[in-house]
Image (cartoon, rainbow, N blue to C red):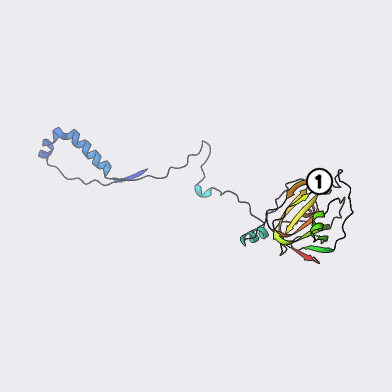
Amino acid sequence: MSSRCALATRPFSLASLASLAPLAPALGALMLAAALGACERRVDEPLQVAPRGEVAAPRSAEAPPAVAEAPPAVAEATAAGRCIEPTPDAPERPTPKAGPDPACPEDPTGPFQLATGKVIFLDAQAPDVLVEIARKERERARGLMYRKSMAENRGMIFVFQQRTQHSFWMHNTCIPLDMLFIDGDGTIVGIEENTPTLNDSTFDVGCPSTYVLELNAGWARRHGVRAGQKVRLEGI
C-alpha cells in the first residue's frame, strides 16, 4: 500500500497556544482525523505469495489453456457454415475381428445385380474403390445384407434423391463396416467407423448428405480418410 498526504497548517502564537492548553487532547484528535481525511490513498494489487521453496510466476508467464485445433479442411468447411462431424483421433469402437458374424442368416434370395461405379479420394493417399450402386428404394433397403465377405477395395454407395440427415442400421448385415456420409459436392461430412454386425441400432453423423458409402470396417482409417476431405464419383 502507498499513500500521499498534503496537510495545510497555520502558525499559532504562544498566547493562543496557552489559552488552548486545556483543549489539547480534543484538538489533537481533531488534527489527526483531518490528517487522515486529507490523505489520498492508492491500494496496490496484492502480490502472489509462493509456497516456501517456490517462486511465483508473473501473470504474463501463465500459459493459456490448450485448445485442440480442427484439421484445416474441417476448420475451413465449418467456417463456411458446412456441417461436418470431425473424425476423432481414435475410433470410438474397436476394429472388429475379420470375417463374417457366425450368426449370419442365410440369404433368402441371393444378391441383387447392381450397376457399378468408382469413388476416387482426392485428399488422401487411398486407392480408388469400385462400388455397387444402390439407387432404387429396394436396393437401398437390401444393401449389404447377408454378405459374408467383401474385397478390400470394394464397397456399396447409396444414392438418395433428397439431401438430408440419413440414418443406417446393420440389420442382417454380417460383416462390420465403415459408413462414409458424403454431401452432393463430394465432401465427406462424417464417418461411422467399425459398425457392429447384426445390429438394429441406428448410425448417423448428424449432418445432411446425399450419398452414403459402405466399406469394410477400418478401411477409412487404414488409408487416412477423414471427415472434411473430398471424393470424386465416377459413373454414379
Residue 139 lies, in percent from the top left, at: 82, 58
| Residue 10 spot, x, y in % from top left | 17, 45
Q: Where does the N terminus fall, quadrant-wise?
A: top left
In the picture as drawn, the residue positioned furthest to the bottom comes out as: 235
In the image, 14: left or right of 64? left
Residue 118 lies in what quarter of the image? Answer: bottom right
> What residue do we see at 14% from left, 34% from top?
21
Is 24 located above or below residue 203 in the figure?
above
User: Could you tell me the amino acid type at mark 1?
Assistant: Leu
Between 109 and 169, the one lying in front of the other is: 109
Name the residue at 17% across, 34% down. Answer: 24
- Name which residue lies at 76% across and 65% down: 232
Frontmost residue, 6 versus 64 = 64
Q: Position of residue 48 (x, y in %)?
A: 47, 41
Residue, disc 1: 198
Q: Quadrant of residue 156?
A: bottom right
Packing grade of label 1 (10 A; few <14, some 14-19, many >=20) is many
Which residue is found at the position 81% from the left and 46% from the top?
198
Residue 171 position within the rendered picture, expressed as x and y whole percent measured from the top left: 80, 48
The foreground one among 201 and 92 is: 201
Q: Nearer the viewer, residue 153 or 54?
A: 153
**Is the residue 217 above or below the residue 163 in the image?**
above
Task: Report the quarter where the C terminus lies.
Answer: bottom right
